[in-house]
Each structure stands twice: as C-alpha cells, then as structure tokens.
C-alpha cells in the first residue's frame, strides 16, 4: 500500500468522483483526508430487483464481482451464507462479511481473476449474483472447463443520469481530475461529456485499471493508471498528473 498521497496544502487540487454510492462516499472521504478538494456526482444509482433462491437450485459456490449485489441482496442472502463466496476486491469481500458470509475468497483485479480461484478449488456450479448488465464468463471456458456452469441471479440495475450535473461541469472547468472506477462508467462519462462544450483533450483522468484505460480511449489531456485496483493507488495515480 502506498504512503499518504502528499498534496500542496496551500493549493489543494481538485477531483471529480463519478462512481455510484456507497463507493462514492468512501472514495470522497479518503480523498478529502489526503488533501483533495472533491466534487462528487455519481453517474448512476443502483436499484434493487426482486430475486429468489429456488429450493431445488444446486450450486457449490457463490461469485460476486460488485458489492452492489450484496447491498441489494436482501433476506434471500440468508439462504446462501453457508456457501463459499468468491469476491472481486476488498470492498466486495468486506460487504459480504458484514452480510454474514463466513467463507470468503478474495481476488484482486476483475472477474477473470476469480475464475482462477474457482478453477483451483474445482468449483463447477457457481451462483453469480449480478447487476442487470454483466460480463458472460462462459466465453472464458477452455476445453478442460466445459462442464462449469454459472447460474445467474440479477439483484439490481443501474439508473443512469441523463446529463452531467452542473457541479461536475464546473469541476471540469476548474481542472478537476476525473476518477474512473469501471469501464462502464468510463464509457458513460464519455457519452455525457459529448453533450457539453468540454472536449476530452481538456480533461485529465485517473483510471482504476489498464482495462478501463483501454475502454475510455486515448484522446484525453492526460491519463494515469492505478498500479493496483485500489482507491489509494488511484489517488496516487491522480497525484502524478501535472
């Protein structure tokens, strides 16, 4: 973990946080502790979707790539807390622990990193708790994994905003560095930015991973990539921008 991100206290720099809650508040509070001035305008809001675990549903592990699935799981999660849960990232693992899951395997990075743990532990029928839009990992199967099955349960959907809020536009005019935590919201930010008079080549961005950097494109004023998919490393990347 990097040491504290040092900023000039006499001239604090600005950040624009776009991720949904509750992550938005977590990132904002950490950035403020590190000396940043932060504008927080989430690009979407998660809304729960009714779901249920059928009595005859057979699986040997649970897979979660976003803490949102835990936040919106409701009482149905009580039926599956005795199963091993494979999570992407510390935030998701922490949410699962608070929800009562006892056996949690945490993978850093993305969903592909979880697949390696599932393969290691010979998990063949995996219950995936997802949002309405999710990546289909069946495409990742190879000849040795043809029998692996993902049982999909949709627990939430994201309601996108229609345009960048005035506060976000003002932050960009004031040279705020944009923090991008996912490919989805990186792409949405580009679409919303296109509706304004602000061009990408006027904007500096810091992204959580090389995958997000690839998705968001290269025509920005500057791009910094976190060394690891973690907020402290993302803030370190942002601090490296001039």
Image: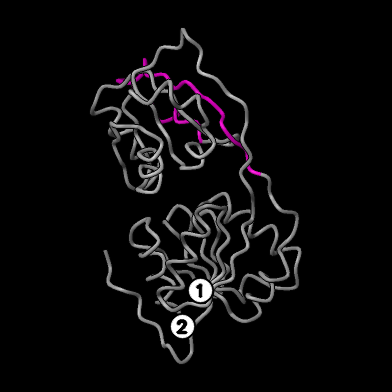
Q: Is residue 233 above or below residue 77?
A: below
Where disc 2 sits, the SS reads loop
- Are circles 1 and 2 on residues that touch, CB within 8 Å? yes
Pointer 1 residue: 222
Where disc 1 sits, the SS reads strand
* Residue 176 found in image quarter: bottom right
Count all numbered tags in the image, as a single digit. 2
Left/right placement of residue 233 relative to residue 220 reads left
Left/right placement of residue 198 relative to residue 33 reads right
Select label 1 or label 2 by which is in front. 2
Q: Where in the figure is residue 110, as x and y percent of width and height?
A: 39, 44
Q: Nearer the viewer, residue 6 or 100?
A: 100
Graded by Cα atoms within 10 Å as few (under 14), some (14 to 19) or many (20 or more), the crowding at tag 1 reads: some
- Residue 141 inside the magenta-drawn segment: yes
Q: Where in the figure is residue 63, as x and y percent of width and height?
A: 40, 31
Real-space Cα distance between discs 1 and 2? 9 Å
Residue most extreme to the left = 120
Residue found 55% across the figure and 68% down from its top: 178
């Amino acid at each position: 973990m990097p040491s504290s991100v040092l900023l000039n206290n006499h001239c604090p720099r600005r950040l624009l946080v776009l991720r949904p809650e509750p992550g938005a508040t977590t990132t904002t509070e950490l950035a403020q502790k590190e000396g940043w001035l932060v504008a927080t305008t989430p690009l979407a809001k998660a809304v729960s979707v009714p779901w249920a675990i059928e009595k005859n549903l057979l699986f040997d592990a649970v897979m979660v790539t976003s803490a949102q699935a835990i936040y919106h799981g409701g009482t149905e999660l009580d039926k599956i807390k005795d199963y091993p849960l494979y999570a992407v990232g510390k935030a998701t693992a922490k949410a699962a622990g608070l929800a009562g899951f006892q056996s949690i395997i945490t993978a850093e990075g993305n969903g592909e990193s979880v697949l390696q743990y599932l393969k290691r532990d010979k998990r063949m029928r995996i219950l995936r708790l997802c949002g309405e839009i999710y990546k289909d990992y069946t495409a990742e199967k190879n000849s040795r994994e043809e029998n692996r099955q993902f049982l999909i349960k949709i627990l939430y959907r994201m309601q996108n905003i229609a345009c960048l809020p005035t506060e976000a536009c003002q932050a960009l005019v004031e040279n705020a560095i944009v923090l991008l935590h996912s490919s989805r919201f990186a792409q949405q930010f580009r679409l919303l930015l296109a509706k304004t008079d602000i061009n990408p080549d006027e904007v500096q961005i810091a992204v959580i991973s090389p995958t997000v950097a690839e998705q968001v494109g290269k025509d920005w004023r500057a791009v910094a990539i976190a060394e690891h998919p973690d907020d402290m490393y993302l803030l370190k990347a942002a601090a490296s921008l001039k």
